[in-house]
Image (cartoon, grey):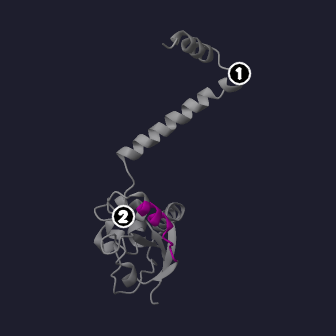
């Protein structure tokens, strides 16, 4: 038969008086374990998904992270398919710069409040603070020069450009012809 008093005495001795060398690490260890636990629970409840909402396995996650983005020149016609429906990526132009806004798919992708700007030049609509269809330049027409914007609208557009430059990947430029 095993004498449990020896084990109990040993446990009491190490738990009641931790050595001074390890005692100050215990709060940090507890904090680390708590953070790790919260992260793991979060990942179980909210697993990584693709832009279309499909849950990704580890191999798909690695592939998604390693796909290179090539800086490209777009015309309004070649930009249009990148609306989140035809092409999975969501791209949007602001002041002649094309940004990959796929990370903000809930805003710019199908069903999002800014979805009409996906695959398009959003400059006029952002400058005027309007999501109306008439704010969009026709795909087959000349590019919008934005020459009629007033000072406040230009400032609003510049603020939006800074927002996109700070948050999303610049992946190209919008040009009239290739």
Q: CA distance from mark 1 to mark 2?
A: 56 Å
Q: Nearer the viewer, residue 154 or 177?
A: 177
Number of numbered tags placed on the structure image: 2
Residue 57 is left or right of residue 67, and the answer is left
- What percent of the width, then of the height, locates residue 143? 41, 83
Residue 87: x and y in percent read 35, 74
Q: Which residue is mark 1?
A: 20
Can you say whether 129 is above or below 13 in the image?
below
Magenta segment: does it hold 69? yes
Circle 2 SS class? helix
Q: What percent of the width, then of the height, locates residue 8?
A: 54, 13
The answer to whether residue 95 of the structure is visible from this angle is no
Q: From the viewer's side, name the closer residue of 127 and 52.
A: 52
**Crowd tier of the residue under label 2, counting other residues whose Cα lies within 10 Å: few below 14, some 14–19, many 20 or above:** many
**Residue positioned 32% across, 59% down in the render:** 54
Task: Spot the residue most to the bottom.
Answer: 178
Give the prevailing secondary structure in the magenta stretch: helix
- Magenta stretch: residue 65 in it? yes
Q: Secondary structure at mark 1?
A: helix
Identify the residue at the far front of this view: 1
Q: Position of residue 30 (x, y in %)?
A: 55, 30
Which residue carries the number 2 mark?
Answer: 108
Name the residue: 39% across, 54% down.
48
Q: Which residues are magenta?
A: 59-70
């Amino acid at each position: 038969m095993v004498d449990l008093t020896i084990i109990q005495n040993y446990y009491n001795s190490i738990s009641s008086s931790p050595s001074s060398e390890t005692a100050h690490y215990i709060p940090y260890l507890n904090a680390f374990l708590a953070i790790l636990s919260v992260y793991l629970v979060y990942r179980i409840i909210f697993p990584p998904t693709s832009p279309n909402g499909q849950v990704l396995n580890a191999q798909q996650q690695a592939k998604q992270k390693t796909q290179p983005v090539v800086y490209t020149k777009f015309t309004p016609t070649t930009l249009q398919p990148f609306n989140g429906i035809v092409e999975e990526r969501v791209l949007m132009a602001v002041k002649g710069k094309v940004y990959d806004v796929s990370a903000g798919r809930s805003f710019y992708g199908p069903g999002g409040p800014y979805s009409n700007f996906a695959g398009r030049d959003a400059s006029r609509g952002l400058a005027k603070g309007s999501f109306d269809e008439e704010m969009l330049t026709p795909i087959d027409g000349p590019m919008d020069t934005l020459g009629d914007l007033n000072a406040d609208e230009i400032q609003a557009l510049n603020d939006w450009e800074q927002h996109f430059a700070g948050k999303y990947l610049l992946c190209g430029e919008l040009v009239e012809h290739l």
